[in-house]
Image (tube, rainbow, N blue to C red):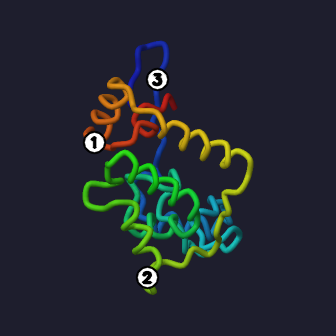
Amino acid sequence: MTSTNGARHVDEWLPIHGWSKAQVRELSGYRGLFHHWTYDSEPGARDWGGSSRCSCSICILASLRDLLLNSRRRPRLANLYAAVEQEIGHRFKRDRSLAEIIELSQAADAPEPGIVLPDSGPDFIAMERAVFDALKHPATSALVKRTDSATSREGGCLSCIESPN
């Protein structure tokens, strides 16, 4: 129990948060529990050879290995991020640009993607067009201020920080 007001009490039930990756994987295999395919080398493999965490494909909070893997899994998206980075003059992470991450992802010792997503559907194409259209217009000072303050906060990207859920 974490709190009570006499009329109700709140229990926090998140035992898995204190577990190691090995414990989670052991339970999943033992019970045959479903886990998202992004943790695997490819959908259905159940080999835990994919991303270490389920998040945005290209996330500033991701490990280098996950960024290398997902740059290969979603090359068109990675290239779109790199184009934005180049256009606005900001690096994806303080220590690395996305262009550098893409280059590193092509090295022989980079993780194999297992699956490559084409990002060729109408939703991706519409988003890509909207991004390039937005880049044609200078940013307003409010947008620049918001972006600068968001990236300087711990955690970085606005979708993780300001998500209502």
Give whichever of discs 3 and 1 has the lower sequence position. 3
Which of the two discs, 2 and 1, sits closer to the camera?
2
Instruction: Give the structural element (helix, strand or loop) at label 3.
Output: strand
For marks 2 and 1, give the CA distance: 30 Å
- The spot of residue 158 in percent (x, y) is 41, 36
Give whichever of discs 2 and 1 has the lower sequence position. 2
Mark 2, residue position: 107
Image: 133 above or below 22: above
Give whichever of discs 3 and 2 has the lower sequence position. 3
Which of the two discs, 3 and 2, sits closer to the camera?
2
In this view, the residue in front, 57 or 147, is 147
Q: Residue at x 31, y 41 (%)?
A: 151
Image: 51 above or below 150: below
- The spot of residue 55 in percent (x, y) is 50, 52
Residue 35 in view, yes or no: yes
In this view, the residue in front, 67 or 139, is 139
Residue 54 in view, yes or no: no
Residue type of the residue flagged with mark 1: Glu
Mark 3, residue position: 9
Q: Residue at x 47, y 78 (%)?
A: 106
Q: Which residue is drawn at 73% across and 52% down?
A: 121
Mark 1, residue position: 154
Dot 3 crowding, Cα within 10 Å, few <14, some 14–19, many 20+: few
Residue type of the residue flagged with mark 2: Ala
Instruction: Give the structural element (helix, strand or loop) at label 2.
Output: loop
Q: Is residue 112 left or right of residue 123?
A: left
Dot 2 crowding, Cα within 10 Å, few <14, some 14–19, many 20+: few
Q: In this view, does 146 lie to the left or right of 66?
A: left
Q: Quadrant of the N terminus?
A: top left
Query: Which residue reaches farthest right?
Result: 122
Instruction: Give the structural element (helix, strand or loop) at label 1.
Output: loop
